Image (cartoon, helix red, strand yellow):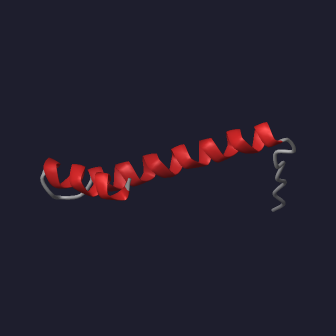
Amino acid sequence: MNITFHFPTSEKELEGLSKKVALVYANAVFEKVNKLNCPKEQKVEILNSIK
């Protein structure tokens, strides 16, 4: 299996990619914390401590 990557070539494209990666990571963290078996207040506290 061959995989081809096309990386951004301009500063603007690189910034856009970085923002997309950050958004995906933030959503993954949110979903993981949201699935924890603890009170909502504790989940909010966890997310705030990550920020």
Task: Indicate left or right for 18 with 37 as reference.
Answer: right
Q: Residue at x 82, y 49 (%)?
A: 7
Residue 27 spot, x, y in % from top left: 44, 46
Residue 18 spot, x, y in % from top left: 65, 47
Q: Quadrant of residue 1?
A: bottom right
Task: Indicate left or right for 18 with 1 as reference.
Answer: left
Q: Residue at x 69, y 38 (%)?
A: 16
Q: Which one is nearer the viewer's eye here, 20 or 5?
A: 20
Task: Indicate left or right for 29 with 5 as reference.
Answer: left
Residue 38 spot, x, y in % from top left: 15, 57
Q: Which one is nearer the viewer's eye here, 19 or 32?
A: 19
Q: For the image shown, how many numbered marks are present on the structure?
A: 0
Q: Residue at x 40, y 54 (%)?
A: 29
Q: Which one is nearer the viewer's eye here, 6 or 23?
A: 23
Q: Residue at x 60, y 48 (%)?
A: 21
Residue 45 spot, x, y in % from top left: 22, 54
Residue 46 drawn above or below residue 41: below
Task: Indicate left or right for 38 with 22 as reference.
Answer: left
Q: Residue furthest right?
A: 9
